[in-house]
Image (cartoon, rainbow, N blue to C red):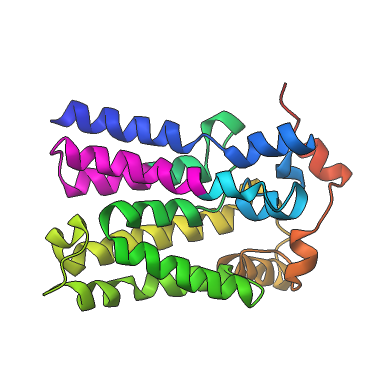
Amino acid sequence: MLVPSLLLIVGAYLLGSVSPAYILGRMLGGKDLRQYGSGTLSGSMVFEHVGRWAILPILVFDPLKATLPALLALWLDLGVLVAAGAGLAAVIGHNWPIYTRFYGGRGMATFAGVWLALFPPGALWMVVLLGSGWQLGDSAPWLLLTLLSMPLLAHLFNGPIMLGPVLLGGPVLVGQLAGAMILITLAKRLEANRRPLPPPGPERLKVLLRRAFLDRDMASHEEWIRRQPVVGDAEQIEPEA
């Protein structure tokens, strides 16, 4: 079953690399969203710089591109580990998409898609906590809290309530999956679509800490997400044909 498993995981990465945020930004606003706001190809940047209604197809497609490969692995009896690997491959494709030279999104909705396939209560938990964070003005810190709390949630559901095939592997597997998601999140935040860092010193450390915990380079969240293109950004990312 090695070859089907590898093909599924590679296919999940390629599907995850499809960025509706990039497509909608180009089609509806004539904008390369990699040059706006946080520079991520994400629903939040579409919401801010293209149109609020335009986020709806992203809220559907971004989770499903992880849910479908994970469910397919289960339907093909490839095992829960392959299903988890396919879901994470879709997240990696979303965050580092091959089609846009590895400039991608943040993976929040795609993480929820993994949980939707493997641990449905976890998907609901993500929606509730990230929605609360968004209402309070910034969902980025809440993602880490959500993932850190996922093993506890699995313990609560592992018993008389068996929801989600990943619980066949127990809360330990949920914890491992959440840990992998935390590592992917931190890697993406620190790499920040190859955005340059300040020179070595206290300011660089401050920026790295903000990236890790707040997913931005400056103190103000509002200023960060509403940034407009500057010459340096335009030179750094050449628009594609």
Magenta extent? 60-89
Identify the residue shown where x is 67% and y is 64%. Answer: 216
Residue 75 magenta-highlighted: yes
Q: Could you say where residue 240 lies in the image, as x and y percent from the top left? A: 71, 26
Number of numbered labels in the structure image? 0
Q: Could you say where residue 148 lies in the image, as x and y percent from the top left? A: 38, 73
Instruction: Name the residue nearer the viewer: 97 or 15.
Output: 15
Residue 144 shows in the view: no
In the displayed structure image, the side of residue 40 where residue 212 appears, left or right:
left
For this orientation, the residue located farthest to the right is 231
In the displayed structure image, the side of residue 86 where residue 199 appears, left or right:
right
Q: Could you say where residue 236 lies in the image, as x and y percent from the top left? A: 76, 38
Residue 134 in the image: above or below residue 39:
below
Residue 38 in the image: above or below residue 162:
above
Q: Could you say where residue 63 lies in the image, as x and y percent from the top left? A: 44, 49
Looking at the rendering, in which quadrant would you find the N terminus? top left
Instruction: Name the residue nearer the viewer: 160 or 175.
Output: 160
Residue 146 magenta-highlighted: no
For this orientation, the residue located farthest to the top is 241
Identify the residue shown where x is 26% and y is 43%. Answer: 71
